[in-house]
Amino acid sequence: MAAANSTLANGPAKSPSAGRLASVYSEVQTSRLNHSLPLPSVLNAPFNVADGPPSSAAGNPDEIAKLFPGLFGQPSAILVPTGSGSSDLTGCMKIGVVLSGGQAPGGHNVISGIFDYLQERAKGSILFGFKGGPAGIMKCKYVELTPEFIYPYRNQGGFDMICSGRDKIETPEQFKQAEETAMKLDLDGLVVIGGDDSNTNACLLAENFRQKNMKTQVIGCPKTIDGDLKCKEVPTSFGFDTACKIYSEMIGNVMIDARSTGKYYHFVRLMGRAASHITLECALQTHPNIAVIGEEVAAKKQTLKNVTDYITDIICKRSELGYNYGVILIPEGLIDFIPEVQQLIAELNEILANDVVDEAGLWKNKLQHQSKILFEFLPQAIQEQLLLERDPHGNVQVAKIETEKMLISMVETELQKRKAEGKYAGHFKGQSHFFGYEGRCGLPTNFDASYCYALGYAAGALLHAGKTGLISSVGNLSAPVDEWTVGGTALTSLMDVERRHGKFKPVIKKAMVELEGAPFQKFASMRDEWAIMNRYISPGPIQFIGAGSNDVNHTLLLELGAQA
Amino acid sequence: MAAANSTLANGPAKSPSAGRLASVYSEVQTSRLNHSLPLPSVLNAPFNVADGPPSSAAGNPDEIAKLFPGLFGQPSAILVPTGSGSSDLTGCMKIGVVLSGGQAPGGHNVISGIFDYLQERAKGSILFGFKGGPAGIMKCKYVELTPEFIYPYRNQGGFDMICSGRDKIETPEQFKQAEETAMKLDLDGLVVIGGDDSNTNACLLAENFRQKNMKTQVIGCPKTIDGDLKCKEVPTSFGFDTACKIYSEMIGNVMIDARSTGKYYHFVRLMGRAASHITLECALQTHPNIAVIGEEVAAKKQTLKNVTDYITDIICKRSELGYNYGVILIPEGLIDFIPEVQQLIAELNEILANDVVDEAGLWKNKLQHQSKILFEFLPQAIQEQLLLERDPHGNVQVAKIETEKMLISMVETELQKRKAEGKYAGHFKGQSHFFGYEGRCGLPTNFDASYCYALGYAAGALLHAGKTGLISSVGNLSAPVDEWTVGGTALTSLMDVERRHGKFKPVIKKAMVELEGAPFQKFASMRDEWAIMNRYISPGPIQFIGAGSNDVNHTLLLELGAQA
């Protein structure tokens, strides 16, 4: 495979983000480069963009209306075939695109989709890629995307084509910088590929440009492996499908290992700090003995002891059946769902800021009764971590706690107690795993590759139709790609407000696991069987051809009412 | 997919090892069930078993001859087409098979290969699967393998068909138990699927049966993901190919993440306690910035400080080029290769057994000078681990040290020093990973599936030809399966002796990474480029159809002189 980009083919990359050499691609990477992507049928023929009904907000519409006077209430957009040979969408554009936040498989395909739209439907257009996330907009750091530049990234994982960043455009000065960039590049439009925060930001930017009477429109695209940016019109965020399949491959392998070895309990921590969608989806794909869903723990107001007991009870029951092994899935955000832990952390932060932590432990008397009990229930190593490792603000670093190791230690202690009481006669050995970075930059599945391409293509069309403040929306995802619907949804319709520092701030609420929703209900109906009997499924490595290669994840299918 | 085994289809498994329900297989698992395996052409037509030249030993042939008077010197065996329509191999047999030691992808296919040989070439034969490893032989715990029993395990990962175990048949009483089982089941033969120790054991068992004038023959099969059981006649052990490809998928994903994020150094610990083949193979597949090869560290008599400096130097150089990220591979056995660490551990064991470890640290004066320096060079957490966590014999638990975290901490300290000296101006954040259990039970690659099937089929043929004390040997592995050679190699020819407790013990020496060998040489010729420029390759998930699906690993191809 010859390197398609001549500047890359000439030798080593000159700058850190200068990219890839297609000539050192693996066979699978190369085969994916040339994978041709199907488009929804509406995108395969001339189309126009029609308006849907006017929109409101997810909550507090009056406040949202005040925050977005220019955009609030605008209708969603739907792409419809013209029926004739021509479309109303004409002319060329100058468009910018930016990746915002953590990596998710498929980001490169969104960019390819925008690019191909411009090439095919708005000839003469220019696409700028802002480098390193929103900071690239503010500093006007960009690269003009060409067919040669884009080619080595088609259907490839990662965000390294233009890289991403976590900066936000928030202050008046930052908005001013964004305006300057938009004017300097004469931007007709900007596509923001990001999660809930980034899409909120995209909408603020759209509102700002409109209020300033600038021509620059802004369209968002739903990205996050965590799967917590979704609504009726945006059935899933991209990257979730691929990431869950990568984690499930690993979990399935560990399950077969557990059954073969017969002597380990594998505690697998999975990404997902705010919501437990990844854990739930991986559970539906693999049938672990236990999966802890943070939203359920919160809804039932469970304590850490409750969670420990739940796990320990199942381990004891399994031991009676002769199984001294198993696989347990835990979302990384678990302890954020437990109110008593939040309370303890708050008290610790207060004490650590103002008091002396004496060796004898007298300081513990400053904890409230319940917090003291919890603190003493925690394993020694976690206690030390809470006291010693603090962030630059002096706060306890909750995110650094390795939840799976903490649970192993607590379960171990509980099992020893039960053994002493004659209630448990098995043997327990815990093995900890964290599956995270492995899943964020894998080669996108066929689903994510096609979904992202359609999202990008649609974003191009929405900009071409003069739309702003919408999020690219591709629907009917349980059907073949051909039948997918394409349009845009008012970002304001996804928003509610939160009161921060005495002011209302707009937020797109994270979509949590709904305990009444079909995915959790299916899990809940099967978990007792999975706990005791071993129904392990090993999904195996993601396939790009043949068996399972076009499967869609269970969460999405169940939410769409299709059979998973 | 209906469950093939009626006892399984009737409900939950009654015993912990009672197996699988094909009805809960994933699509990929199901597709693999029905994957038809190619056989070397010699196995596709009538063949006989011919003798090669007589053999010697890998070392100390006189001692090996004394230890194996009945077997020493026996020739290797080669399967040759009869040319006519009939073979000399006739009659039916009763055969046992056992899995010994850690899991490796493909074990089930070895068993399928033996089984299919018996079905196709020795009709009326019976195959017993001993359960839970060599203990199953000693306790006569077995299951009679039928087509229905075997079917759900075809081309599947894991060892759960009959499970494995780490017991050894060593004492006279244990040999006696094995003899009783062989007689009770009227065994004509036994196939031992295992690593270096298990194959040594298989040979002792073969010798023992022969000396007792029993008819039971023993054939070994080379298994270990570590890749350290190999020689000229046995070019690779099964499972290595699959495990390395699974780890490389993960490493490739982490590389793309590192490049996209631009702010982490990922330290990846890989399985391989005795030899660094896995780390080397994964390096050849993915081109990391650094891969530490234990055998080189040992050959150069490097210290932990040397290794730390080597890594730190590269990090500094990369920082000057604007790269504050990277991927570093480390074999889990690294510190076993460092003589000074071994010395420190020995001294610590002595001190911990006999002295008091005082808070003030006066005990450290009992360490030799060099050991004291090393101890104080170690990160605090590792120091504590060495002193506090001990095995039931009171010894320091070296295996529990998370080498990748230790190195991150040491590199961090060194970088801070250099920063203070004005020699480093970058920023460093380490992320640790351990890829181990994920790789031992994956669905076998096409290579491992075919290789194992041929190994098993050959083992059946060797037993049928009256052979004992051989290891099943399939060669010419860089050619298409069709052209593979098939035979058996005298296990004694792989052996040397070690003196233990004043006695000679036979051992199959582990095959270490050879610094003059082609795989290491290729790595050595490229690593300077990989260190500074980013030549990352992302192999992607193992494919069973299409691009790359029939690729063989680099180590094997390079060792066979083929182009990798």
Image: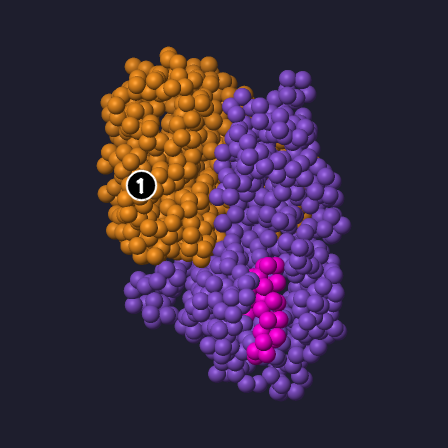
Chain colours: A orange, B purple
Q: Nearer the viewer, residue A40 or A476?
A: A476
Residue found at the very far top of the displayed protein: A354
Residue A296 % position (x, y):
27, 39
Q: For the magenta stretch, what is the residue range?
A: B191-215
Q: Nearer the viewer, residue A61 or B273?
A: B273
Which residue has dot 1 on it? Answer: A417
Q: Taking A483 as reference, is B264 above or below it?
A: above
Rendered-image quadrant of the C terminus of chain B: bottom right
Tell me what residue is drawn at x 59 percent, y 37 percent. B350
Residue A105 % position (x, y):
48, 42
Residue B414 % position (x, y):
63, 25
Q: What secondary structure characterizes most of the magenta part?
A: helix
Kindly tell me whether residue B456 is visible in this rendering: no
Picture quadrant where residue B451 is located: bottom right
Q: Nearer the viewer, residue A322 or A71?
A: A322
Tell me what residue is drawn at x 33 percent, y 28 percent. A376
Asked if the stretch drawn in magenta spans residue B199, the answer is yes
| Disc 1 residue type (three-letter) | Lys
Number of numbered labels in the structure image? 1
